[in-house]
Structure formats: C-alpha cells, structure tokens
Amino acid sequence: SSLSVLTMPLPGTRNAPRKFKGKSSEIEEFLDIYDRLLRQNNIISDEDKCKSITQYCSSKVKSFVKALTSYQENRWDALRQNLLDLYDADLATTKYRQKDLLKFVKESRAKPMKNLTQWKRYCRRFIPIAGYLRTKKKINEDEYATYFWAGIPKSFRAILEARLLAKDPSRDMSTPFKYEEVEKVATAYLQRDKFPSMLIDSDSEDEDGTLSDLSDESSDSDSSDSDSDDERERRKKKKKEKLKSALKKSQKKKRAAKDEDDEEDEKPAKRRPSAHSEQKKHDKVEGLIKQLNRMNLDDADYGATYYKALKIDNDIQKVVRPP
C-alpha cells in the first residue's frame, strides 16, 4: 500500500509518539520522533506536516498550535521552530558558563589524583562542562586543552610534563598539550605496577595515604558507577584514618619495647623525615626535571645536573634522558 497521511500511526498506538503535553524537557524528542514518522510515511507536503502534528498533542497544546500563524499558513519549518522557541527547549538543556569550568578546574587541582579511578573521574567530570562550552563556541580548542591541563594537581602535572617532553623534546611550549596526549600518558603511567612508590610525594598531606589508596584502588575499580563519588570518598577517608591510627599504635609499641631493651646501649632512633623535608625534596626534584628538559644533551652542565637529580631520586632515570 502507498504511504501517506493515512498510514501515520494512530495516537496512543505502539509506533505513535507519546502525547505532547507542553513540557519543555520533551519538545525536542517529540519533534524528532514526529520528523521520523514523516519520513517513514513519505509526507512531503507542508500542509500535511502541519495538520498531522496536532493529533499527537494534548487538547491545551492543540489549541495553542492551531492559533499560531505558521500553522494557519502551513509553513512547517516556521511552525517547528515556533514550538522549540515557545516551549523553551533551551530550558531543558544543561547550560554551563565559563566560570563553572573555572570553578571545577580550581577544585580538581586541589584534590589527589594518584590512581586510575581518580583520573577517570576527573575526565568524566571535565568533558561535559568543557565539551558543552566548546560546542557552543564559548571556548576554542587551545582553551579546552589548557583548562584540562590546569585541572591536574601540580605534582602530577610535573610528572606528565616530563614524559610528554621526553617524547618530543623540541615541541613548542607556547601551545598547550592536547587532551588526547595527556590522557594517554596519564593512563599509561597510572597503570604501571610501580606507580605507588612514584607517587608518595603527591599533593596529599598524609605520608601514609599511598598505602591506603593501594587497597582502595582494587575495590574502587570493581565498584559500580551507581555508587556516588561522595560515598566512595567517605569510605576512603575512613580507611585512611583507621590505617593511620593502627600505624601510630604499632610504632608507639615498637619504640617503647626498644627503649626498654636498649636503653643503655642504643642511640636514639633516627626520626623519620618530616612531611616538610619530603615536600622540599620533591620540589627540588621537580625543579631539576624542568631544568633538564629545557637543556640539550650536549650542554656542558647537563651531566652534572642529571647526576645531581639522580642522587636525590633514582627514579629520575625513568623520565629524563641520561647524558
């Protein structure tokens, strides 16, 4: 049988669009389904397109549509746009502003990013906001990449920068690293077996946080996305506090026992490096990495600078070219 207005599905049947009752959140989907039905039934006349839509509308909406000039003049494109505008389709679309992206970036750079779970969570939250702004031409490609880079914690940025520059030492540093480049290097780095020892000097303030994150990562990677991020953060915080408490008690008992047995002969045990000295060491290594990446292999000071950094941290040879 030939297709026409007569073959359009009856209201309320399986293939018919759900009755439109005037909700702004439903207008775009309603019109998309109606457009598809028009094509399937080979409806090409503007008059047929205009007259057929009212059968899928509530009584109130039907009266409103029939009162529109575009409906009365059988101008389908104009009628379709009228419906989108008057039922405020934009109201149902999540809208972000540049200040929303800036706020997100500032918050993210202050949070730890020490495992793949935390990294993927950052990417999942960044893309909807920045992607929306890029689609709407509010930011360009370079700004998109710059915001993405700025949202990464400073210590992790230094690690990623060293690896990216090792791949391309002569790259133009006036242009930001592309999202795809950074995402690839970060994912590869966080999947390495030895990554916990490389990340002890992270932005997290507690020295034993890495141990807690190790146990948490295996459970986090298996947990469903249905768990809220806040719940996972609370669980992590509790585990960290328990681990810190247990470590403190254990160390206290060991010190007490050692003092009793070796009170006369033993020298006082060396104190563990403070968080301040550890951070100072980390900052020094970070500065040397940046200095080396700006130098050429044949520079007179390259070798001396390299071995100075190597003496502080053996892992330097994994991210910087040897002389």
Image (cartoon, rainbow, N blue to C red):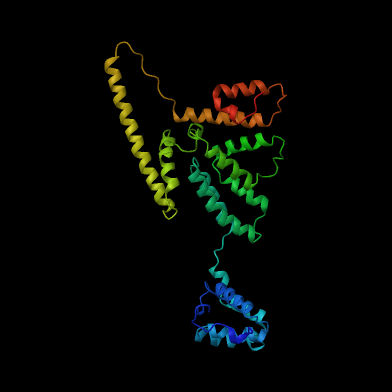
Comparing 264 with 44, the one in front is 44
> Does 54 sit above or below residue 284?
below
Which residue is at the far front? 1
Instruction: Give the tally of numbered discs.
Output: 0
State the residue at coordinates (63%, 44%): 181
Q: Residue at x 43, y 55 (%)?
A: 226
Give the x, y percent position of residue 201. Answer: 49, 33
Residue 256 is at least partly visible in this image: yes
Q: Relative to the observer, which residue lies in front, 239 or 36?
A: 36
Is 4 or 202 nearer to us in this picture? 4
Is any atom of residue 99 visible in this view?
A: no
Q: Position of residue 242 (x, y in %)?
A: 33, 38
Instruction: Report x, y in % for residue 166.
Output: 65, 34
> Can you say which quadrant of the picture contains the C terminus?
top right
Q: Position of residue 50 (x, y in %)?
A: 62, 84
Give whichever of 238, 278 is nearer the camera: 238
Quadrant placement of the N terminus = bottom right
Quarter of image, res 32? bottom right
Report whether 13 appears left or right of 144: left
The quarter of the displayed image where residue 296 is located: top right
Identify the residue at the far left of this view: 260
